[in-house]
Image (cartoon, rainbow, N blue to C red):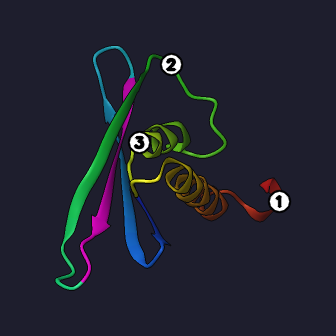
């Protein structure tokens, strides 16, 4: 199963590609964060994360934990405070896109 989330941050297009894979003991979720480099329109991988599960997850929506883990490790700008602000904004936008309206 693969799911794609799109958002923007300060004019940069960000794509989060999530997939699920079976493992010997359970399954894992993998998230890859890609950013468009601007003029040429090529995407490059900014960060990846994976989380393995034995049984099931207790997330509000599929891939929530792995998306948040991947975003926490991202560096979108040099200033720590600005970076934290951007990451929080991206998390909020992805959560709103993935959750139904009544769950906000």
**N-term-proximal mark, 3 vs 2:** 2
- Identify the residue shown where x is 37% and y is 64%: 15
Report the residue at 79% width, 54% height from top. Answer: 103
**What secondary structure is the stretch in magenta mostly built from?**
strand
Q: Which residue appears farthest toward the bottom when viewing the image?
A: 39
Q: CA distance from mark 3 to mark 1?
A: 26 Å
- Is residue 39 rendered to the left or right of residue 58? left
Q: Mark 2 = which residue?
A: 55
Q: Quadrant of residue 64?
A: top right
- Name the residue at 18% across, 74% down: 42
Q: Residue furthest right?
A: 102
Of helix, strand and loop, which one carries label 2?
Answer: loop
Q: Residue 102, labelled with which disc? A: 1
Tag 1 secondary structure: helix
Mark closest to the chain's N terminus, 1 or 2: 2
In the rendered view, does 91 fall on the left or right side of 7?
right
Q: Quadrant of residue 94?
A: bottom right
Place of residue 26 in the rendered image (x, y in percent of width and height, measured from the top left): 39, 20
Q: Give the image location of residue 70, x and y in percent.
A: 41, 42
Tell me which label, 3 or 1, sits earlier in the chain: 3
Q: Quadrant of the C terminus?
A: bottom right
Question: What crowding class fits label 3: few (fewer than 14 Cα within 10 Å), some (14-19), or many (20 or more)?
Answer: some
Residue 41 belongs to magenta span: no
Name which residue lies at 62% across and 36% down: 59
Image vertical order of residue 14 relative to residue 27, above or below: below
User: Which circle, 1 or 2, is nearer the viewer?
Assistant: 1
Magenta-drawn segment: 27-38
| Pair 3/1: label in front | 3
Q: Which mark is residue 70?
A: 3
């Amino acid at each position: 199963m693969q799911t794609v989330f799109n958002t923007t941050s300060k004019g940069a297009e960000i794509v989060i590609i999530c997939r699920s894979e079976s493992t010997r003991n359970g399954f894992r979720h993998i998230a890859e964060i890609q950013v468009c480099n601007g003029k040429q329109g090529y995407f490059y991988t900014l960060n990846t994360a994976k989380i393995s599960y034995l049984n099931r997850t207790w997330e509000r929506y599929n891939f929530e934990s792995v998306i948040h883990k991947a975003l926490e490790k991202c560096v979108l700008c040099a200033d720590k405070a600005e970076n934290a602000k951007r990451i929080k904004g991206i998390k909020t936008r992805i959560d709103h896109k993935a959750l139904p309206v009544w769950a906000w």
